[in-house]
Image (cartoon, rainbow, N blue to C red):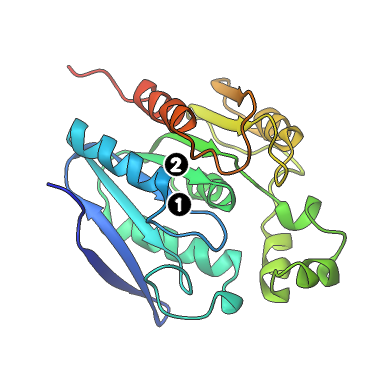
């Protein structure tokens, strides 16, 4: 079947690009990282996996990224969460397997909280919850490093690691041992904060932040495969 066509939904006056592959449940929902898009190596590998398995899959570009119009500088975590939630609600049915990369892992955690009844499992790839908190000294430091003041403020309002994260589905965190952007301590802290008893961390030896090498993508696909319910 190959690549699915790009289509658009309107969310709060913003036009959001997506690719939707029809198939059986659970629908894999891929959430890109900051300034990334739905055409990266991990997203394409997951889409190919979904096609081979006959699964539905949804990929989106947040406003101001990829094929979605707008300015990246106008994007905030709250806006992008709103867009992801709208796509989740309008374009998918049945159970969902969330896969979030870097900042997308932060959004995935929020989606799992907001739609717990539909979330079958969650995979965080170099997940970066609360990176506005631990990644910068303050808002000025964040702006100097290319993060808009609006995003920093929004991120601070949507922090999760200060207490229990009330998610009860299986959660798998895949993290590079040598990730220079998101320390492995964040993955360990996330694992501890998630309420579910079924949380596992796969620390990949020598892996960096992108986790896009063939062996790393293989680990991601094996993880997703392990979370699929066995066929009746």
Q: Going by the image, does 72 lie left or right of 27?
A: right
Alpha-carbon neighbours of circle 2 within 10 Å: few (<14), some, or many (≥20)?
A: many
Q: Quadrant of residue 203?
A: top right
Local secondary structure at mark 2: strand
> In the image, residue 224 lies at what x, y percent?
39, 29
Q: Earlier in the sequence, mark 1 or mark 2?
A: 1
Distance, label 1 to label 2, CA atoms, is: 6 Å
Q: Are marks 1 and 2 in contact (CB under 8 Å)?
A: yes
Q: Establish if 181 lies above or below 200.
A: below
**Quadrant where the C terminus is found in the figure:** top left
Q: Establish if 53 lies above or below 109.
A: above
Q: Establish if 73 lies above or below 39.
A: below
Is 207 or 139 nearer to us in this picture? 207
> In the image, residue 171 lies at what x, y percent?
52, 29
Residue on which the image places disc 1:
31
> In the image, residue 178 lies at what x, y percent?
70, 33
Q: Residue at x 37, y 59 (%)?
A: 60
Q: Going by the image, does 88 lie left or right of 25?
A: right
Q: Residue furthest right?
A: 137
Alpha-carbon neighbours of circle 1 within 10 Å: few (<14), some, or many (≥20)?
A: many
Residue on which the image places disc 2:
99
Q: Residue at x 72, y 67 (%)?
A: 152
């Amino acid at each position: 079947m190959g690549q699915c066509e790009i289509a658009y939904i309107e969310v709060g006056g913003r036009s959001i690009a997506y690719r939707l592959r029809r198939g059986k449940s659970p629908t894999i929902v891929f959430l890109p990282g900051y300034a990334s898009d739905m055409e990266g190596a991990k997203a394409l590998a997951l889409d190919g996996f979904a096609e081979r398995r006959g699964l539905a899959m949804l990929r989106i570009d947040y406003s101001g990224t990829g094929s979605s119009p707008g300015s990246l500088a106008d994007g905030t975590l709250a806006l992008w969460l709103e867009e992801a939630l709208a796509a989740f609600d309008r374009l998918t049915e049945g159970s969902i397997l969330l896969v979030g990369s870097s900042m997308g892992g932060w959004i995935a955690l929020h989606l799992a909280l907001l739609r717990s009844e539909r979330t079958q499992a969650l995979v965080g790839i170099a997940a970066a919850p609360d990176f506005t908190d631990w990644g910068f000294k303050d808002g000025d430091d964040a702006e100097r490093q290319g993060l808009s003041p609006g995003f920093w403020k929004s991120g601070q309002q949507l922090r999760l690691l200060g207490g229990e994260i009330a998610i009860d589905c299986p959660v798998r965190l895949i993290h590079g041992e040598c990730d220079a952007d998101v320390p492995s301590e964040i993955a360990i802290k996330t694992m501890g904060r998630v309420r579910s008893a079924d949380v596992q961390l796969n620390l990949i030896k020598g892996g960096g932040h992108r986790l896009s090498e063939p062996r790393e993508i293989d680990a991601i696909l094996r993880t997703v495969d392990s979370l699929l319910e066995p066929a009746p």
